Image: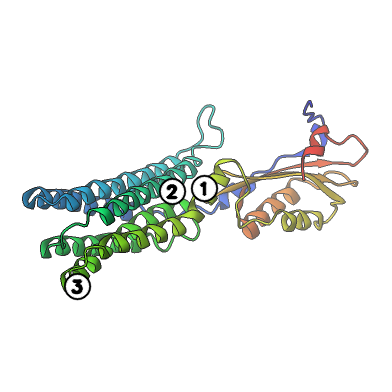
Amino acid sequence: MREDHSHENHAGHNHGAHGHAHSPASYDGAFAFGIGLNVCFVLVELGVGLSINSLALIADAGHNATDVLGLLLAWGATALGRLQPKGRFTFGFGQATILASLVNALLILVAAGVIGWEAIHRFANPSPPNGILVMVVAAIGVAINLGTAWLFSRGRKTDINIEGAFLHMLWDGLVSLSVILAGAAILLTGQAWIDPAISLVVVAVMVAGTWHLLVASSNLSLGASPAGIDLAVVKAWLASRPGVASVHDLHVWPLSTTQAALSAHLVMPKGHPGDLALATFAHELDEKYGLSHVTLQVELGDGANCSQSSHGQ
């Protein structure tokens, strides 16, 4: 069906909230510090693994290298999100943060699958008890990974791109901790099955803890409105504004993992309320609901509503 925006005499397209947009906090220092630490740890772990011929340490070094990749993805997406709109990218590049969070969720689940597969194989072919040196290296990994995760802990509840970086480091810290616990238990009991058993528990925790990130990033990548925005509440708020008789064609979609846009048609029988009124609406939508890009179209309600309204809210 043809979309008709013929109400130009009564249209108000206001983006006054842009100056007040809630810019995401900068985690550049955390990313640089975390990546630097983890690159050093991967090199140390690989060197020790090669020197003592420990396949476990060599494999874990490869796994930790995916953490570096995950952090680089999240950091790169954050940097892209700060770029100004250019050419065909009229909303900027903020949606790169959504793609990065989705890729990070998939990377974590792939890592969980690899660990789980290896654990199942170890039940059939139990490994000898972990050496003290392996446990020491794992302890260093716990400190580095959990310390890096802590750097991102503040932003993980408001930005799923940061949550992806946080979970990468948290789960790797947990994996390293499981190596220490399994090594200690095996040295005390001599039961080699403890190692794969603990690994499977860690895998279950990884999958359960990452599921929210996978679902949230998948939804945002498909253009779903952010989970924290109740469309019915937003519509009711707009309908309660002075002069607004009804609201239709309400759409909310993500611009990044921290910003969202809104467009709506307001039926105002008394006519256009003026630019200041629309700017106030936009400002309050930003303040109340974090909608940083607002486009409002005013209609008189004379029966000539846009044909696309049947597809809106």
From the image, tell me which residue sits under label 2: 105
**Quadrant in which residue 122 is drawn:** bottom left
- Disc sitting over residue 217 in the figure: 1
**Quadrant in which residue 242 is drawn:** bottom right
SS for tag 1?
helix
From the image, tell me which residue sits under label 3: 189
Q: Position of residue 250 (x, y in %)?
A: 74, 45
For badge 2, the amino acid type reads Ala
**Quadrant in which residue 1 is drawn:** top right
Q: Residues within 10 Å of mark 2 (few under 14, many from 20)?
A: many
Q: Position of residue 170 (x, y in %)?
A: 35, 60
Residue 292's place in the image compared with 170, above or below, is above
Q: Which residue is located at x 87 percent, y 44 percent?
A: 271
Residue 66's place in the image compared with 175, above or below, is above
Mark with earlier residue (3, 2): 2
Instruction: State if disc 2 and disc 1 touch (CB < 8 Å).
Output: yes
Q: Is residue 2 left or right of residue 269?
A: left
The way the protein has been coloured in the rendering is rainbow
Q: Residues within 10 Å of mark 3 (few under 14, many from 20)?
A: few
Q: Residues within 10 Å of mark 1 (few under 14, many from 20)?
A: many
| Frontmost residue, 301 versus 121 | 121
Q: Nearer the viewer, mark 3 or mark 2?
A: 3
